[in-house]
Amino acid sequence: MGIVQWLYSSGENWFCLDKIAHEQIEKLWNHNQASWVTSEAFCGPIYVDTSMMTLIYNGYSYTIARFRI
């Protein structure tokens, strides 16, 4: 099956989300849902929409990607 990693883009760069956020986003992904998620990568809660593949934090929108290793 492989290992799955969640990434977000900022400018031209892609960054890995932390394990806490990864676990929560994977649950949302499995049910095609959107919700607030806790993340150590950001200084507060982030809103993740898996159907739109976006993450919103502090008024900024980031594209997210699900990467299978």
Image (cartoon, helix red, strand yellow):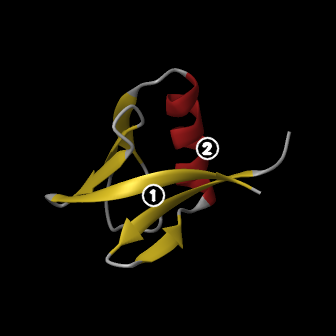
Q: Tag on residue 23? A: 2
Locate residue 26, reporting x and y percent.
59, 38
Image side of residue 41 versus residue 19, left or right: left
Left of 29 or right of it: where is 61? left
Secondary structure beneath label 1: loop
In front here: 43 or 23?
23
Q: Is residue 26 left or right of residue 11?
A: right
Residue 46 is at least partly visible in this image: no
Numbered label tally: 2
Seen at 13% across and 58% down, the residue is: 59
Position above or below: 17 against 38: below
The answer to whether residue 5 is seen in the rendering is yes
Q: At 36% across and 31% down in the image, what residue appears? A: 34
32 vs 4: above or below: above
Q: Secondary structure at mark 2?
A: helix
Q: CA distance from mark 1 to mark 2?
A: 10 Å
Task: From the top left corner, tell me how far across and down residue 2 is, in percent.
Answer: 84, 47
For the N terminus, the quadrant is top right
Q: Residues within 10 Å of mark 2 (few under 14, many from 20)?
A: some
Lower position in the chain sequence, tag 1 or tag 2? 2
Q: Quadrant of residue 62?
A: bottom left
Taking the view exactly as shown, the residue that stands out farthest to the right is 1
On the rendered image, what quadrant is the C terminus found in? bottom right
Q: Quadrant of residue 57?
A: bottom left
Q: Residue furthest bottom?
A: 12
User: Residue 60's quadrant in the figure?
Assistant: bottom left
Residue visible at 50% across and 72% down in the picture: 15
Identify the amino acid type marked 2: Glu
Q: Which residue is mark 1?
A: 39
